[in-house]
Amino acid sequence: DIQMTQSPSTLSASVGDRVTITCRASQSINTWLAWYQQKPGKAPKLLIYRASSLESGVPSRFSGSGSGTEFTLTISSLQPDDFATYYCQQYNSYSSFGQGTKVEI
Amino acid sequence: QLQLQESGPGLVKPSETLSLTCTVSGASISSSGYYWGWIRQPPGKGLEWIGSIYYSGSTYYNPSLKSRVTISVDTSKNQFSLTLSSVTATETAVYYCARRGGYCVGNGCYFDYWGQGTLVTVSS
């Protein structure tokens, strides 16, 4: 099993802040990593795949980086619509998700 | 516009079998070239991949659930289904169906289109 660990679990931020979320894999996953945004009562929304590829329609303030075991999701200037929970997902071997990072005011 | 919709009982008794169906609209399961999958999320917790299926019937299952999971496809109805046997209360969750993305290799992939999810409660 590949374990995914996100940090922090909760992040307090303000509109306009630059926000970074980290995801670590228990073994190398190359760049087979995706990021999702989830709002309460809604399905997850794909933001990033292959570690750094922006899904169509996702604002360019979202970016992803990393390879191997350490990855980051960056929001360059936090907007009111960005307050949500974010999940990373590895798909190098089957699939597993991180525990989530809640971005709150 | 691709849409996925989960359906099935919202309440299942412990030790019984959970059965859900996902109806796909806006694209044909058999001609799209994509895999389709199930993911679940217990209330207030994180996401767990259950398994995925191709229109041909080829499947990948989460190893931790493999002995109890079956995913099947009905191309004539443009649907795919999940059965999970011997459920326990800890498997109370929102169950999502989703489409696997296109830029993957092997048994894992991200998911780019999701249904709205359906809550299944396991309780007597």
Image (spheres, coloured by chain):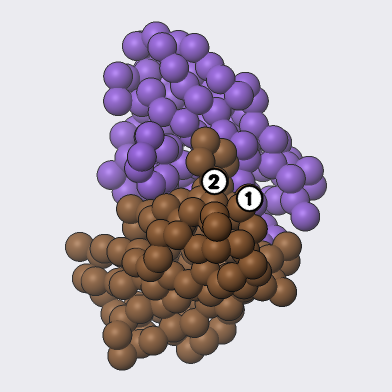
Disc 1 designates what residue? Answer: B90
- Identify the residue at image location x=41%, y=59%: B10
Count neighbours of disc 1 (C-alpha within 10 A) and say few if under 14, some if 14 to 19, many if 20 or more.
Answer: few
The chain letter for the residue carrying disc 2 is B
Q: Which chain is purple?
A: A
Do tags 1 and 2 sit on the same chain?
Answer: yes
- Identify the residue at image location x=39%, y=72%: B21
Residue B96 versus residue B17: which sits nearer the camera? B17
A76 in relation to B43, above or below: above
- Identify the residue at image location x=56%, y=20%: A10
Identify the image quadrant of residue B70: bottom right
The chain letter for the residue carrying disc 1 is B
Q: Is residue A64 left or right of residue A77?
A: right
Q: Which chain is brown?
A: B
Helix, strand or loop status at disc 2: loop
The three-letter amino acid code for the residue at tag 1 is: Thr
Q: Which mark is residue B42?
A: 2
Residue B27 versus residue B115: which sits nearer the camera? B115
Q: Estimate the x, y position of residue A19 in percent, counting from the top left.
A: 49, 18
The three-letter amino acid code for the residue at tag 2 is: Pro
Residue B55 versus residue B7: which sits nearer the camera? B7
